[in-house]
Image: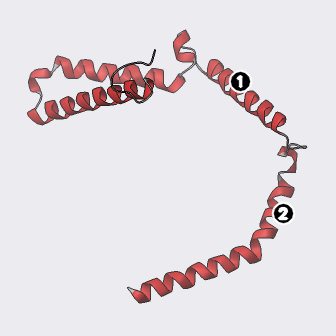
Amino acid sequence: MAARLAQLRAQAVQAAEFASKHGGSYYKELMEKNKQYVVQPPTIEKCQELSKQLFYTRLARALVLTNTPYVSKFLPGRYESFWKELDGVKQVWKNRKDLKVEDLGIATLFGVELYAWFCVGEIVGRGFTLTGYKV
């Protein structure tokens, strides 16, 4: 164990030496290659503007990429997966007589877990009080 620890320590020292020797030049090369993406001057206002642009760009992309109903435009991948899951549940319900006890137990535990997370969310929403909302 001590030999393995010494070997790991030696490898860490070598990696640190390599990074200190070549890290600066790698950083300069990377920044030079991507200087057209660096915004000058780096101010808080510019960061907030870029953040807003990113949000609306992603929103526009989601609207363009989907040709499904209105709701799915805001959640493109989740909408289709929801309907696939619902179809799976319908199939299981149709063949419920073929279910094993283990499957029913897992489904019950999953339902209990969902209810527990709902209760935790309610407690957090009330400001971590168990008795009710503060009025």
Classify residue 66 by image quadrant: top right
| Residue found 52% across the figure and 13% down from its top | 71
Label 1's element?
A: helix
Up-down relation of residue 66 to residue 54 (above or below): above
**In the image, is 73 to the left or to the right of 119?**
right
Percent coordinates x, y for residue 113 in the rendering: 27, 32
Element carrying mark 2: helix
* View extreme (front): residue: 135
Kindly identify the residue that appears in the image at 18 percent across and 29 percent down.
Answer: 108
Residue 39 - label: none
Mark 2, residue position: 28
Name which residue lies at 69% across and 80% down. Answer: 17
Look at mark 1 in the image and give the residue it sits on: 56
- Local packing at callout 1 (Cα closer than 10 Å; few below 14, some 14-19, many 20+) is few
- The first of marks 1 and 2 along the sequence is 2
User: Identity of the amino acid at label 2?
Assistant: Lys
- Which residue sits furthest bottom? 3
* Neighbour tally class for label 2: few under 14, some 14-19, many 20 plus, Cα within 10 Å: few
Measured as percent of width and height from the top left, residue 25 is found at 81, 69
The quadrant of the picture occupied by the N terminus is bottom left
Q: Quadrant of residue 123?
A: top left
Left or right of residue 2, residue 107 in this image: left
Is 31 on the left-hand or right-hand side of 130? right
Between the C-alphas of marks 1 and 2, the distance is: 32 Å
Where is residue 36 shown, x and y percent of the image? Answer: 87, 46
In which quadrant of the rendered view does residue 103 lie? top left
Looking at the rendered structure, the kind of residue marked 1 is Tyr
Between 67 and 107, the residue placed more toward the observer is: 107
Q: Position of residue 94 (x, y in %)?
A: 18, 17
- Left-right relation of 44 to 59: right
